Amino acid sequence: QMQLEESGGGLVQVGGSLRLSCAGSERIFRSYAMGWFRRSPGKEREFVAEILGDNHIQQYAESVRGRFTISRDNAKKILYLQMDDLKPEDTAVYYCGAAETLNRATLMEFGYWGQGTQVTVSE
């Protein structure tokens, strides 16, 4: 059963950068579609980015496209999210999720989640 642990969150100024990491436990990590999601106070969890396990095809939310980059190292079983040009509206708890599929996953298919890491962007 996949276990996930995020790290790399923190406080950063507007325009700054952070890189989040998510370590996975499953031996066949490459068989999972991996994604980043976030939740701001008073809002629902929203999709940020997804990367497929085998061909590394990526998808992004429109709000982060061109600023965030999702990547993965299947050998190390780590998922990354490079966040550049951060804005106050990026402030949220960021979660990584895993879906046991080689294809794009729906939210319902993300059955494994990390505990989340706080990202705060200050003016």
Image (spheres, helix red, strand yellow):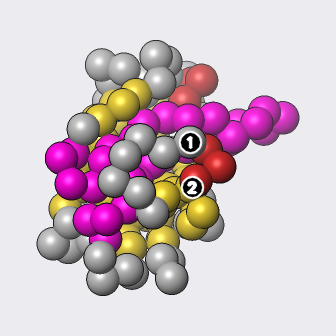
Using a 10 Å C-alpha cutoff, classify the residue at mark 2 as few (fewer than 14 neighbours), some (14 to 19) or many (20 or more).
some
Report if residue 37 lies within the magenta region. Answer: yes
> Is 77 on the left-hand or right-hand side of 15?
left
* Quadrant position of residue 64: top left
Nearest the eye: 77 or 94: 77
Q: Residue at x 36, y 20 (%)?
A: 65
- Note whether 106 is above or below 30 in the view shown: above
**What stretch of residues is rendered in magenta?**
29-56
Q: Which residue is mark 2?
A: 110
Quarter holding the C terminus is top right
Q: Secondary structure at mark 1?
A: loop
Q: Is residue 12 visible?
A: yes
Q: Give residue 105's position: percent from left, percent from top.
A: 48, 45
> Is 104 on the left-hand or right-hand side of 75?
right
- Residues under labels 1 and 2: Cα distance? 7 Å
Nearest the eye: 8 or 100: 100
Q: Residue at x 15, y 72 (%)?
A: 75
- Note whether 85 is above or below 120 in the view shown: above
Q: Secondary structure at mark 2?
A: strand
Whether tag 1 and tag 2 are in contact, CB under 8 A, the answer is: yes
The amino acid type found where label 2 is placed reads Phe
